[in-house]
Structure formats: structure tokens, C-alpha cells
Image: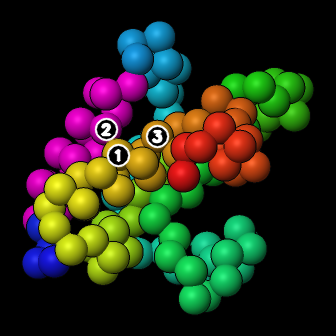
Amino acid sequence: MHPVSRDHFADLVAAAIAALPPDLRRHLDRVQISIEDEPSPEDYRLNGVPDDEDLFGLFEGSALTDSMIDADATLPNRIRIFQWPHEEVCDSFDELRDEVFRTVHHEAAHHFGIDDDRLEEIGAY
């Protein structure tokens, strides 16, 4: 697939966020959401992701279900979405849009305290 502009990719991320139910979306108000080109080797290492797997996004912070006693109030929760891995695996714009949608919702789920095992259990993959 031909790469899209950063603004166009940001529009896809914004549309994915807007597609969340309002009751959930309002809990993302304090979450910093950024778009980056690609994850670093350290992102792979720190998150236990093998080098031969794609990393589309990361949630960093404390889930809403975690105790606030353990949370570091000085650091906001953050969702990082990586543009280049999305473009590398998608063959069409529709596929890119769908993958961005899945990634944003996957990382938002982590913010709400839903881990990968539970996401797989409920068929979110």
C-alpha cells in the first residue's frame, strides 16, 4: 500500500476514537494519544514482543482498574500508535482503516484494564 500522509493517518486515529461509545470515550480525555513512525527496539524489548512480530501501538500507564495508590500522578497515561507498521501490512486503504480501528480500540482497552488474554478470550483479535 502507498503510505498516507501523517494528517490522513491522524484522521483515521481520530475516527477510531470517535467510534468508541461516549461513556468510554470520555475516560480517554486525559490520555495522551500520539502517532509515531515506528516502535523502537527498546519498545519491543520492554514489552516482550519478538522482533519478527509487528507492533502497531502501545498503552503506557496505569489502567483505570489499577489502584490509584500505585499510580504516578505526574505521568499521564499514553497511547502510542505506530504508522509505518500499519502501512507495511495493509494492502488497501480499507484494510488500513480497519487495522487502525482495531489498534486504537485495543490500546484503549488496556487503559480500561482489559489485558491481551481477555481481549483474545472475547474475540477482539
Q: Is residue 61 visible?
A: no
User: Could you tell me which secondary element the residue under label 1 belongs to?
Assistant: helix
Residue lying farthest top?
23
Dot 2 or dot 1: first in sequence order is 2
- Magenta extent: 5-20
> Pointer 2 and pointer 3: residues touching (CB < 8 Å)?
yes
Q: CA distance from mark 2 to mark 3?
A: 7 Å
> Pointer 2 and pointer 1: residues touching (CB < 8 Å)?
yes
Where's the N terminus, which quadrant? bottom left
From the image, tell me which residue sits under label 1.
101
Residue ID at (50%, 76%): 54
Q: Nearer the viewer, residue 54 or 78?
A: 54
Q: Neighbour class for label 2 at 10 Å: few (<14), some, many (≥20)?
A: some
Q: CA distance from mark 2 to mark 1?
A: 5 Å
- Residue 24 appears at what percent x and percent y? 49, 18
Q: In the displayed structure, would residue 110 be above or below residue 49?
A: above
- Residue 34 appears at what percent x and percent y? 38, 52
Q: CA distance from mark 3 to mark 1?
A: 6 Å
Quadrant in the picture for residue 52: bottom right
- Residue 70 appears at what percent x and percent y? 87, 34
From the image, tell me which residue sits under label 2.
16
- Residue 122 appears at what percent x and percent y? 65, 38
Which amino acid does the dot numbered 3 rest on? His
Which amino acid does the dot numbered 1 rest on? Phe
User: Could you tell me which secondary element the residue under label 2 belongs to?
Assistant: helix
From the image, tell me which residue sits under label 3.
105
